[in-house]
Image (spheres, grey):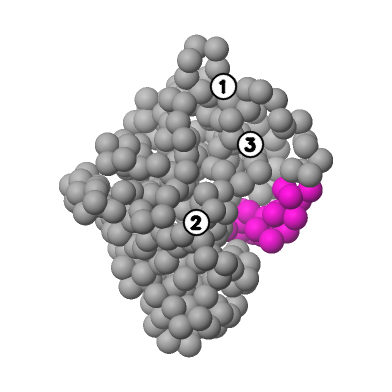
Amino acid sequence: MAVIRLTEYARGGGCAAKLRLGQLSQVLDTLVKRGSGSGGADIVVDHEFSDDAAVVHHAAGRDLVLTADVIAPLVDDPHAFGAIAATNAMSDVWAMGGEPRFALNLVFFSDEQLPMEVLDQILAGGAAACARAGVAVVGGHSVRDPEVKFGLSVTGEVDPQNRTARPGQTLVLSKALGTGILGQAIKKGVASEVATAAAIASMTMLNQSAMRIGHAHGVTAATDITGFGLLNHLRNIVRGSNVAATIELAAMPVLPDALTHLRANLCPAGSKANRAFASAETVWSTGAPLVADQLDGEAELLASLACDAQTSGGLLLCVPSERAAACVAELRAAGLPAAAVGSLRERDGNAPITLA
């Protein structure tokens, strides 16, 4: 099979191709006001606070976790793309503290432009990721589409629990940031082999161990960092739990070359939109507002990194402060570049997120 650059068959790559959060929030707010079928006694979590997945009661005593996630290619290798897309989709279940059990493939593919061997490799990559997670792929659906996309609909299980972040907790991030920037560099053909390999390794690393380690250290809430960036996924936590947060920008783990490309103004449009949206509810520790599209100085670069549209990013864990150091140590022992990146505090009427 001739060498094919899969990223040429998509306008946007990975989770950076999502609808912009500002637009999507308006639609979701309207759905909440209309009810959109919510309110049933068996519904535990729906879309009201933009959680990572829905949770519903099940007669067997455990709750079901339901999610669907589809992305466009942000790497050129079909097998790697399939594995990234599957890992990304299953991550929503781990972010809710659950274990994924079953999956359906969701395929968008052009049989007129690409050989079916490419699709075979995409599906093989997805199946391999699911097998590592102990998830059974039981079917799927396909659509002929000139833009390649792949993902999963995933069903998992979780024990009934209270998912509330609490003042005084430490925010622990399990993976490094920068996949959105590196995806853009890969698409433009300027990413180094080392950076490309590091990004793929990060995006195909399951969040299963991070979730289990977090459980062992008393995590009460979590989210996975994907297309809306660290700050906007954190926004969902502070909104849902009525707390405020501080992020220590210099503590954030970073993938190789991500800041180098960002200094060269190589930044996905989705990441720029994330920063613009986050600026409405984010201030610097001096009280100055976060300004959109500003890259003047290291702190500003790090602020943009905190808004980078991740694909298959890590978990952001709300950990009791006395357990945070041990949690980070265990995550690192499991091969994750984890770090404590901030803290939660009481909501005080000021901006809910502070950058330090």
- The span from disc 3 to disc 1 (Cα, nearest Å) is 12 Å
Residue at the image position 58 percent from the left and 25 percent from the top? 56
Q: Which residue is mark 1?
A: 57
Reading the chain from its start, which is encountered first: label 2 or label 3?
3
Q: Nearer the viewer, mark 1 or mark 2?
A: 2
Provide the major secondary structure of the magenta segment. helix
On screen, residue 220 versus residue 147, left or right, reads left
Q: Which residues are magenta?
A: 7-30
Residue 175, relative to residue 351: is it above or below?
A: above
Disc 2 to disc 3, how far (Cα)? Answer: 20 Å
Residue tagged by mark 2? 243
Of mark 3 and mark 1, the one earlier in the sequence is: 3
In front: mark 2 or mark 3?
2
Residue at the bottom extreme of this rendering: 296
Of 288 and 172, the residue lying toward us: 288
Indicate the position of residue 340 as horizontal and vertical percent values.
30, 59
Q: Residue at x 52, y 75 (%)?
A: 283
Q: Examine the rendered structure and indicate whether residue 63 appears above or below residue 267.
A: above
For this rendering, which residue is in front, 252 or 184? 252
The local secondary structure at tag 3 comes to loop
Name which of mark 1 and mark 2 comes first in the sequence. 1
- 153 relative to 253, above or below: above
Answer with the quarter of the image where residue 134 lies.
Answer: top left
Residue 208 % position (x, y): 35, 37
**In the rendered structure, which amino acid carries the disc numbered 3?**
Asp
Judge by depth and name the residue closer to the eye, 235 or 200.
235
What type is the residue that disc 2 sits on? Val
- Numbered tag placed on residue 22 in the rendering: none
Query: What is the crowding at mark 3: few (fewer than 14 residues within 10 Å), some, or many (at least 20)?
Result: some
Image quadrant in which the C terminus is located: bottom left
User: Measured from the top left, where is residue 249 in percent x and y?
Assistant: 38, 71
Residue at image mark 3 = 46
